[in-house]
Image: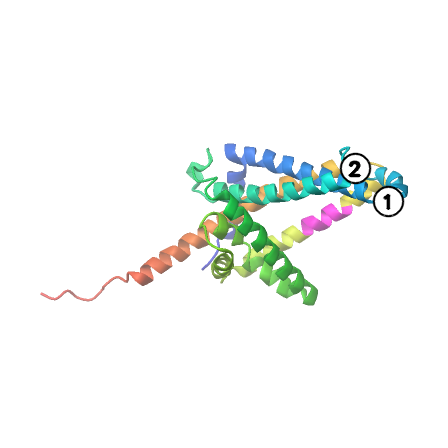
Amino acid sequence: MALQFSHAVSDGIRRTISRTGGILFLGFLAIQFGLQTSANSAVLGLIPPEAADQFSQNAGITIPTSGSVSVALFVVLMVLSAAYFVVLSRTFARPQNEMSQFPATVSRRLGRTTVFALVGGLIVTVSVMLGTVLLILPGLFLAASFLFFIFAVAVEDRGIITSLKRSWGLARGSRLKLGILVVVTALFGGVIGAVTPLLTLAGLPVVADVVTVVLTTMFFVPYHAIIASAYLQLRNEADALNQSTQNPVDASIPKL
């Protein structure tokens, strides 16, 4: 299977600037602000009191809650984030002419699918981290191979193992191009990792959090839409190939 990379990029951007893309952008922005705030508040609430005063100067956006409440809020938002990515995947993985509204199946078996997304996402993350620790190329290979896992879970209602296999199969033959997307993600992470500490050192921790959240949202929403477009390309090609294999055309001369 061959991926038309330039088409995936342009099509993904068009999906992002649609009406539903704008709503999803705002939803992701809100979740990211919640995660950043709850994480800062959890650290501030759990560290010893003598260190809390010093840390609070660089803590960024926080809310006046205890450490345990902040941790609980962070966990809830992580689950909500997984559910959001299910919704995001189901919405973006639709024909371009249907992007003006959310799909009717957007909440179908959402609880079950969210659990699969969380567990499978953890498996993928650990696998990629181990591959990266051993050598960079295995990590890159695994990351490219499992890019479509969330779509197999959310759109095709597959289980964890079958979704991993489905993503692996769809990526076959296009891993080099998909690897470009993985590298771009790593480069973006490097930019964020450089900008945030500079703003914090400049005495602007709240600005650092705002910049991080806004840039992350501006990057990852169109990024996910691009992956959705690539998924649709390769899925449709694979399904067409399977159908032609199962129902071969009889080109023999008909008997009179």
- For the residue pair 49 and 245, the one nearer the viewer reads as 49
State the image coordinates of residue 228 (x, y, percent, origin top left): 51, 47
Q: Position of residue 229 (x, y in %)?
A: 49, 47
Residue 137 in sight here: yes
Q: Quadrant of the C terminus?
A: bottom left
Element under label 1?
Answer: loop
Distance (Cα) linking label 1 and label 2: 18 Å
Q: Which residue is mark 2?
A: 60
Assess disc 1: are there few (<14), some (14-19) or many (≥20) residues with their C-alpha within 10 Å of its C-alpha: few
Q: Residue at x 36, y 60 (%)?
A: 242
Q: Give the residue number, with chain letter if any, for mark 1.
A: 48
Is residue 212 in view from this perspective? no
**Residue 187 in the image: above or below residue 172:** above
* Residue under the image location 73 percent in, 36 percent down: 210
Q: Residue furthest left?
A: 256
| 126 left or right, relative to 51 | left
* Start-end of magenta stretch: 187-194
Residue type at tag 2: Gly
Q: Is residue 51 magenta?
A: no
The amino acid sitting under disc 1 is Pro
Say left or right for 155 vs 29. Answer: left
Of the numbered discs 1 and 2, the one sitting upstream in the chain is 1
Q: Nearer the viewer, residue 42 or 16?
A: 42
Q: Quadrant of residue 139?
A: bottom right
Residue 136, image x and y in percent?
Answer: 67, 64
**Residue 153 screen position, x and y as percent:** 49, 51
Front position in the image: 44 or 144? 44
Q: Is residue 13 left or right of residue 133?
A: left
